Amino acid sequence: MIDDMGFPLMIRDMPIPESRDRAGALSVMDEEEFRAFYERTARSLWAYLSRTSGDPQKADDLLQEAYYRFYRAGKQYESESHRRNSLFQIATNVLRDAARRGKRWGEVPLADEQSPAPSPERQVAMRTDVGRAIQQLEPLQRELLWLAYAQGVSHDEIAGILGLRSVSIRTLLFRARKKLAAILTGRTA
């Protein structure tokens, strides 16, 4: 099921499983809090999963799995941003698990940007070029670029989400941008 923007609503109507921590206490987040958190984060998480996996249909399944794992973890968080970063870290692990199972990374569709395209023909050509270029990047490079530039996540948060050292994010982003530019211009990186 999808909403008026074409976004999957599968979790909205899904019953929330009861979650207990190791001591047997109920999860910190109740059903209402979880649904509100889902409403605040699902669109951006789905976009991240869709763009980094390259498969919007697969992103629906990955989204559901990420939220399921997040809820079942039943952890307490220091803040809303800590909770959100943990969710994106779980989603990244779900993506990597799917890739390890031999799932193929499909062609990356590009979101409509707010800036106007020069012409419909040029817009299709640009999407095709960038989509092919992004497809040639490593999954980690796709994840880095998406989190940094589409989601606007800080370097420290990216490090936490992807399980990397904070000091390496700047260098990794530089290399990913350089490789993408080289692919787009036909040069070797």
Image: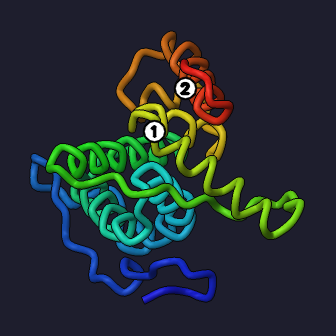
- The residue indicated by pointer 2 is 176
Under mark 1, the amino acid is: Gln
Task: Estimate the x, y position of residue 50 in percent, counting from the top left.
Answer: 46, 59
Side of 67 where 136 appears, left or right: right
Side of 104 where 3 appears, left or right: right
Q: Residue at x 32, y 61 (%)?
A: 62
Q: Nearer the viewer, mark 1 or mark 2?
A: 1
- The residue indicated by pointer 1 is 136
Image quarter of residue 86 = top left
Look at the picture and state if 14 lies above or below 94. below
Q: Residues within 10 Å of mark 2 (few under 14, many from 20)?
A: many
The one of 118 and 101 positioned closer to us in this rendering: 118
| Residue at mark 1 to residue at mark 2: CA–CA distance | 11 Å
Look at the picture and state if 179 lies above or below 8. above
Instruction: Name the colour scheme.
Output: rainbow
| Disc 1 secondary structure class | loop
Image quarter of residue 29 = bottom left
